[in-house]
């Protein structure tokens, strides 16, 4: 069944019972009881037998401080004790944008499970843009809204203030800043083929962890620090991104590694390849 508003090019529908603000429907989500407004240029379809709504063309879905844009949106609902319209799955297709707390996420498709508090974004040019960083991935983004945790999978890359962290997978944890009320990065972990690039050097290893408060990155296993032709190798490294001071450590007994820290330096670096 199609529903069109009086305006010839605008379809609007407000659902007052369903959570959408990319957080679970509980007391921790201040927007969970606010109405969900869906606006579309073409139409809104209410499929009563199959229990879903479908919006087409330049769709905008907004609840509280979160807005989703897409070409097509499907909102599946179920009947519960509290409401006859309890939306539990939201699917968005085509030119997807999710805007919340001054962060923007982009993808071709998005599926949000209200019960799990999990949003999955897929497609080309996946990226998350905030005031101080950009995160991209090849395969998918997974965002656990209740925990404020983001997982970028497949050639993932995070860029912040001139520094880069690349890996097969990146996991970021966000917390609410007490002063601004915005979600800011707390920790960032990297797994597999890790490359950290700073203005001064390049670090590689198998695993890394970045602490945003201290602006310190640690890298583990098969560690190598390269500055021009100069190379340092060890079992673990620590980089202070505020001071640009790097430390590299040898293995300890029980680490499963052998050998000490090694450095190879070229006094006349310009004469070396």
Image (cartoon, grey):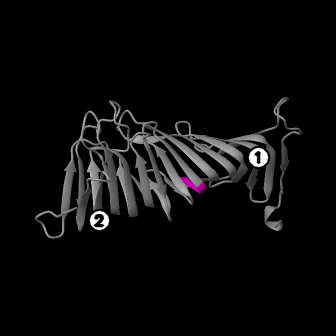
**What secondary structure is found at the residue carrying circle 1?**
strand
Residue that protrudes farthest toward the right in the picture:
259
89 and 207: which one is in front?
Answer: 89
Q: Tell me the quarter of the image containing the N terminus.
A: bottom left
Q: Quadrant of residue 145?
A: top left
249 and 228: which one is in front?
Answer: 249
Q: Position of residue 259 (x, y in %)?
A: 89, 39
Q: Tell me the quarter of the image containing the C terminus.
A: bottom right
List the residue tagged with mark 1.
Answer: 223
**Magenta span has 261?**
no
List the residue tagged with mark 2.
Answer: 56
Res 127 visible: yes
84 to 42, vertically: above or below: above
Q: Which residues are magenta?
A: 154-160
258 and 84: which one is in front?
Answer: 84
Q: Are the residues at dot 1 and dot 2 in contact (C-beta closer than 8 Å)?
A: no
Q: Position of residue 260 (x, y in %)?
A: 87, 39
50 to 184, vertically: above or below: below
**What secondary structure is found at the residue carrying circle 2?**
strand
**Magenta span has 159?**
yes
């Amino acid at each position: 069944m199609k529903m069109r508003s009086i305006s010839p090019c605008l379809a609007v529908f407000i659902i007052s019972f369903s959570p959408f603000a990319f957080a679970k429907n509980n007391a921790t989500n201040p927007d969970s009881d606010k109405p969900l407004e869906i606006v579309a240029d073409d139409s809104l379809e209410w499929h009563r037998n199959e229990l879903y709504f479908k919006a087409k063309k330049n769709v905008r879905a907004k609840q509280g401080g979160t807005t989703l844009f897409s070409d097509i949106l499907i909102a599946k609902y179920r009947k519960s004790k509290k409401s006859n319209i309890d939306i539990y799955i939201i699917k968005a297709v085509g030119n997807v944008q999710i805007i919340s707390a001054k962060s923007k996420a982009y993808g071709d498709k998005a599926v949000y499970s209200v019960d799990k508090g999990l949003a999955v974004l897929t497609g080309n040019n996946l990226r998350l843009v905030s005031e101080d960083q950009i995160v991209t991935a090849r395969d998918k983004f997974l965002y656990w809204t209740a925990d404020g945790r983001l997982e970028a999978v497949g050639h993932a890359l995070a860029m912040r203030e001139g520094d880069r962290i690349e890996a097969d997978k990146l996991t970021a944890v966000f917390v609410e800043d007490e002063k601004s009320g915005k979600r800011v990065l707390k920790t960032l972990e990297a797994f597999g083929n890790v490359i950290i690039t700073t203005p001064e050097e390049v670090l590689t290893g198998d695993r890394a962890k970045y602490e945003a408060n201290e602006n310190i990155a640690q890298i583990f296993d098969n560690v190598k620090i390269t500055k021009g032709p100069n190379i340092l190798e060890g079992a673990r490294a620590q980089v202070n991104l505020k001071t640009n001071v790097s430390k590299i450590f040898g293995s300890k007994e029980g680490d499963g590694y052998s050998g000490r820290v090694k450095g190879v330096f070229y006094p006349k670096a310009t004469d070396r390849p």
